[in-house]
Image: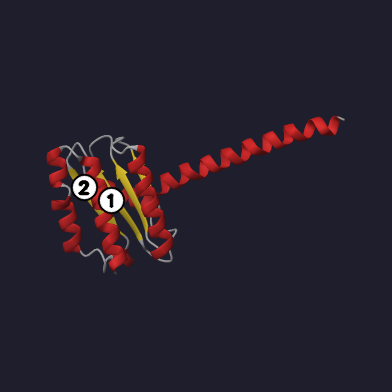
Amino acid sequence: MTNIRKKPLVCFILLLLLLAASGCKDKNDTALFVDDQANLLSSEQRDRIVRINKKLLEDIDIHFLVVTLDTPALDLDAKAVDLFEDRELGKKTGGARGMLFLVDPEGKAVRLETGFDLEGIFTDAFTGYVEREQMLPFFAAGRIAPGIEATVELLVARAQGH
């Protein structure tokens, strides 16, 4: 009789552990692909970017992280390099195939940092265009989140085209 009473409790505990583990996986997936410190993205936008970036990693071995800053960076270039190294972008790939899209909403600036193996796809000219021109209309219109989505789509399309 005692064993019969313990089974439902054990099953319930196992179920809770499984649910907790699946929730952690989703949070970890989000942290791998989006760090919205400025809280600009809706949950739907964030989920969409996570799905796109996860697929990019699975299909063409590029680890792409989007970060929005909640405080302006004194040196956006240095911040991008530090984040790229701290997050070990490219480590999950078969080479130096990491990519960081850093958004400083207060400074109305972005920085694109790529791993060495992606320099043929994301040339200096293209990267410069993204940094100087792509987000400007979105910043001007106060539509930063849609601009982030549009830029992610642009970057992913370029990666898939190569």
| Amino acid found under the numbered disc labelled 1 | Phe
The residue sitting at 16% across, 63% down in the picture is 125
The residue sitting at 31% across, 35% down in the picture is 39
| Picture quadrant of residue 105 | top left
Count of picture labels: 2
Vertical relation: 32 (above or below) 12: below
Q: Quadrant of the N terminus?
A: top right
Q: Viewed as shown, does residue 105 lie left or right of 61?
A: left
Residue 20: give its label.
none
| Picture quadrant of residue 113 | bottom left
Q: In this rendered view, identify the residue nearer to me: 56 or 63.
A: 56
Q: Percent position (x, y) of residue 109? A: 18, 45
Q: Give me the C-alpha separation between circle 2 and circle 1.
A: 7 Å
The residue sitting at 23% across, 44% down in the picture is 146
Q: Are marks 2 and 1 in contact (CB under 8 Å)?
A: yes
Q: Percent position (x, y) of residue 151? A: 24, 52
Q: In this rendered view, identify the residue nearer to me: 44 or 65.
A: 44
Q: Percent position (x, y) of residue 37? A: 33, 37
The residue sitting at 36% across, 53% down in the picture is 52
Q: Residues within 10 Å of mark 2 (few under 14, many from 20)?
A: many
| Amino acid found under the numbered disc labelled 2 | Val
Identify the colour scheme used: secondary structure
Vertical relation: 143 (above or below) 156: above
Q: Earlier in the sequence, mark 2 or mark 1?
A: 1
Q: Percent position (x, y) of residue 99? A: 32, 56
Describe the element under mark 1 as helix, strand or loop. strand
Q: Residues within 10 Å of mark 1 (few under 14, many from 20)?
A: many
Q: Quadrant of the C terminus?
A: bottom left
Please identify the residue farthest to the right as the structure is shown: 1
Residue 101: give its label.
1
Describe the element under mark 2 as helix, strand or loop. strand
Residue 110: give its label.
2
